[in-house]
Amino acid sequence: MEMNAGTRSDLPSRRIHEVARELGLGGNIATMPGLPKVPAASRIKILPDGRAVGLS
């Protein structure tokens, strides 16, 4: 099984658990429920004058 570390953040947590089982990783995997699909940091922009917008 080939694993590739991509940049996708929309990978379903159930798939992460499936891959962990396939790799023989035992134990519990803690996930964080309730996080938004798009990180808040993606809305932050730095203007040419150095001001940050999108923080509120």
Image (cartoon, rainbow, N blue to C red):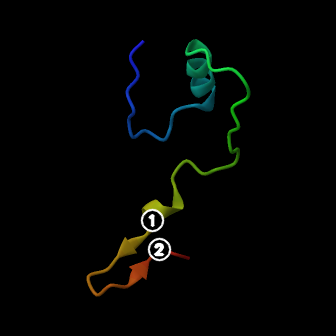
Image disc number at residue 56: none
Image mark count: 2
* Residue position marked by numbered label 1 in the rendering: 43
Looking at the picture, which amino acid does disc 1 mark?
Arg
* Quadrant of the drawing holding the N terminus: top left
User: Which one is in front, 40 or 29?
Assistant: 29
Q: Which residue sits at x=35%, y=76%?
A: 46
Looking at the picture, which amino acid does disc 2 mark?
Gly
User: Which one is in front, 46 or 22?
Assistant: 22
How far apart marks 1 and 2 lie (CA) works out to 6 Å
Residue 38 lies, in percent from the top left, at 51, 52
Compare marks 1 and 2 and give the one earlier in the sequence: 1
Q: Which residue sits at x=73%, y=25%?
A: 27
Give yes or no for contact between labels 1 and 2 (Cβ–Cβ under 8 Å). Answer: yes
Q: Is residue 40 left or right of residue 8?
A: right
The picture quadrant where one finds residue 56 is bottom right
* Residue position marked by numbered label 2 in the rendering: 54
Q: Which residue sits at x=37%, y=85%?
A: 51
Above-or-below relation of 49 to 20: below
Above-or-below relation of 1 to 28: above
Residue 25 lies, in percent from the top left, at 62, 20
Q: Is residue 38 left or right of residue 29?
A: left
